Amino acid sequence: MHGYTGNKQDHLKRLRRIEGQIRGLQRMVEADDYCIDVLTQVSAANRALQSFALALLDEHLAHCVAEATAKGGPEADAKVKEASAAIARLVRS
């Protein structure tokens, strides 16, 4: 079981909303909407994805990483390194 499993339906609902935002962007481009209006919506979609990613990361840390560190050993070290790499990727994006 993954850390996000308990909130899976909420996450799927959130992703469907983000998908709708992206489809809205496609419609805006097809309709030749004003550039700044499109960019505003791109920014909103980016924030929504970042918010989703942070929620998923929080659940990963609280479940997967916490469980591994409680057990200790090489798996704990691997989970911490994995989480650190994921955080680094989020910071760079």
Image (tube, helix red, strand yellow):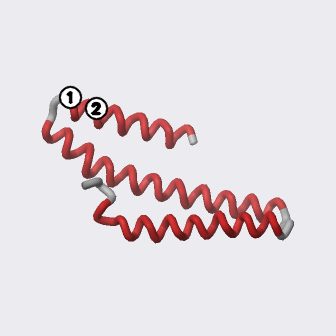
Residue at 80% from the left image edge and 63% from the top image edge: 29
The answer to whether marks 2 and 1 mark residues whose Cβ atoms lie closer than 8 Å is yes
Residue at 44% from the left image edge and 40% from the top image edge: 87
Q: In this view, does 7 lie to the left or right of 88?
A: left
* Amino acid type, callout 1: Pro
Q: Name the residue under label 2.
A: 78
Q: Residues within 10 Å of mark 1 (few under 14, many from 20)?
A: few
Place of residue 79 in the rendered image (x, y in percent of width and height, measured from the top left): 29, 37
Q: Residue 74 carries which label?
A: 1
The picture quadrant where one finds residue 80 is top left
Where 90 sits versus 7, above or below? Answer: above
* Amino acid type, callout 2: Ala
Place of residue 21 in the rendered image (x, y in percent of width and height, measured from the top left): 63, 67
- In what quadrant of the picture does the N terminus appear? bottom left
Q: Residue 29 carries which label?
A: none
Q: Residues within 10 Å of mark 2 (few under 14, many from 20)?
A: some
Q: How many labels does the image show?
A: 2
Where 28 sits versus 69, above or below? Answer: below
Label 2, secondary structure: give it: helix
Q: Residue furthest left?
A: 71
Where 2 sits versus 75, above or below? Answer: below
The picture quadrant where one finds residue 46 is bottom right
Residue at 55% from the left image edge and 70% from the top image edge: 17
- In what quadrant of the picture does the C terminus appear? top right
Q: Which of 56 and 19 is in front in this view?
A: 19
Label 1, secondary structure: give it: helix
Place of residue 44 in the rendered image (x, y in percent of width and height, measured from the top left): 63, 62
Q: Distance between the residues labelled 2 and 1?
A: 6 Å
Q: In this view, does 3 lie to the left or right of 51?
A: left
